[in-house]
Amino acid sequence: RRVIVEAIVSLLPNDEKGSSYSSITPVSFLIGLLKVGIEIDVEISCRLDLERRIGQQLESVTLDDLLIPCVRNEDSMYDVDAVQRILTCFLERIDEEEEDCGYDSDSTCHHGSLLKVGRIMDAYLAEIAPDPCLSLHMFTAIIEALPDYARVMDDGIYRAIDMYLKAHPLLSEEECKKLCKFIDCKKLSQEASNHVAHNDRLPVQMVVRVLYSEQLRLKKALSGDSEEGLVDLSSGLQNRALSPRDTYASLRRENRELKLEIARMRVRVSELEKEQMFMKQGMMEKSGNNGGSLLTSLSKGIGKITIFGGENRRKVNRKSRSVSERKPSRRG
C-alpha cells in the first residue's frame, strides 16, 4: 500500500506557477491520500507534497477534511502540525500571487479566500480545543499562523479560546492572559461581548477591555464618530503612501485593514438598525396601550356624566311636576 500511494502522488500533475489553483486534482482526493499516507507511514517527501497541494486549495476544504488523526504523537488526538504546514503553504501561495499581480491589481479574490480560510480555521480550533492532550503551544501555533486581516469578526476565535479554557482548567493566569491577547475586543459582536462580560473563565483584564471597548463603541454610535474614524484611517493611508519606506506589502496590508474596517462598520450598523427597530416596536406597543386606556377612561367619564346628567334632569322634572300639581289645589 505504501508503494502504491507514493506512486500515485508521483503521478499527480504539477501546478504551474501563475495558473489559478483550481480543482485539477480534487482536494477531497488529496485529503484521502494524505490520511492513508499518514496511517501507513509514507515518505516525508510524499507527505509534504500532499500537504503543499492541499494548501493551494485550502479555501475549498471542509472541517472534516482537516480532522486528520494523529497516529504516532500522543500529545493530541489530531495532527495539528500537518494542518499548520498546510496553512503555511496556503499563505505562501497568497503572497506569491499578490507579488506577481502587484498592488494595482484587484485583490478581492485573494481577500475572499483569506476570509474563507479564516472561518475554516476558527471552526477547526473550536473542534480541537476540547482535546485534553492538546498543548497550549500547538493550539496557539495555529492562531499565530493566521494573520489578523483574515477575520472580519473575532467571535469564532473567542469561541475556540473559551472552549480551550473550559477543557484546560489548570492553565496558569499568565497562560490565560497570553491566550486572550489573540482576541481583538473591537472585532467582537454585541452578543459575544455580552458573553465575555459574564464569563468567569476569562481573566479580569479581558473583561475590562471588552467593557471599555463596548463603551467606546456606544459613544461612537451615539455621536456619529465612526465615519470620522474611517476618514482618518483613509487619510493615514494616503500619508503613509508618500513615505519612501512604503512597500507593496505594507500597502496591501493597509488596504485589507481598510476593507475590514468597512465590513465591521456594516455589521455594527445592521446591529444598530435592529435595535432601533425593536425600540420603535416597543414604543408603538406602549403608545397603543396608553391610547386605548385613555379612550376607555374618557368613554367611562362621558358615560358617568351622561348618567348623572340624566338623573339630575329627571329629578328636576319630578319637582316641576309636583309644584304644578300643588298650585291648583291651593286656588280651590
Image: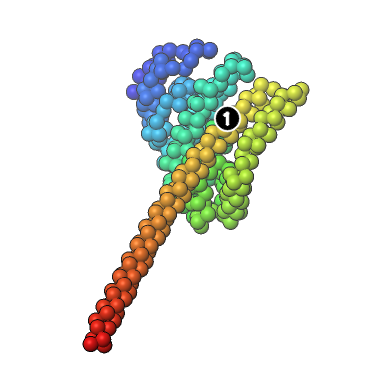
What secondary structure is marked by label 1? Answer: helix
Residue at the spot 60% in from the left edge and 50% down from the top edge: 215
Q: Is residue 281 left or right of residue 214?
A: left
> How many numbered circles are shown?
1
Residue 293: where, in percent of width, then height? 38, 61
Q: Is residue 46 left or right of residue 258?
A: left
In this view, which residue lies farthest toward the right?
244
Quarter of the image containing the N terminus?
A: top left
Residue at the spot 49% in from the left edge and 26% down from the top edge: 113
Residue 146: where, in percent of width, then height? 55, 33
Position of residue 250 relative to residue 323, above or below, is above
Identify the colour scheme used: rainbow
Position of residue 284 relative to residue 2, above or below, is below
Residue at the spot 50% in from the left edge and 33% down from the top edge: 118
Viewer-closest of 306 and 57? 306
Quarter of the image containing the C terminus?
A: bottom left
Does residue 315 appear in the picture of this structure? Answer: no
Position of residue 80 relative to residue 104, above or below, is below
In this view, which residue lies farthest toward the front?
332
Check disc 1 and give the amino acid type. Lys
Q: Residues within 10 Å of mark 1 (few under 14, many from 20)?
A: some
Quarter-of-image position of residue 11: top left
Residue 299: where, in percent of width, then height? 35, 62
Residue at the spot 45% in from the left edge and 52% down from the top edge: 283
Q: Which residue is mark 1?
A: 259
Does residue 8 appear in the picture of this structure? Answer: yes
Residue 81: where, in percent of width, then height? 49, 34
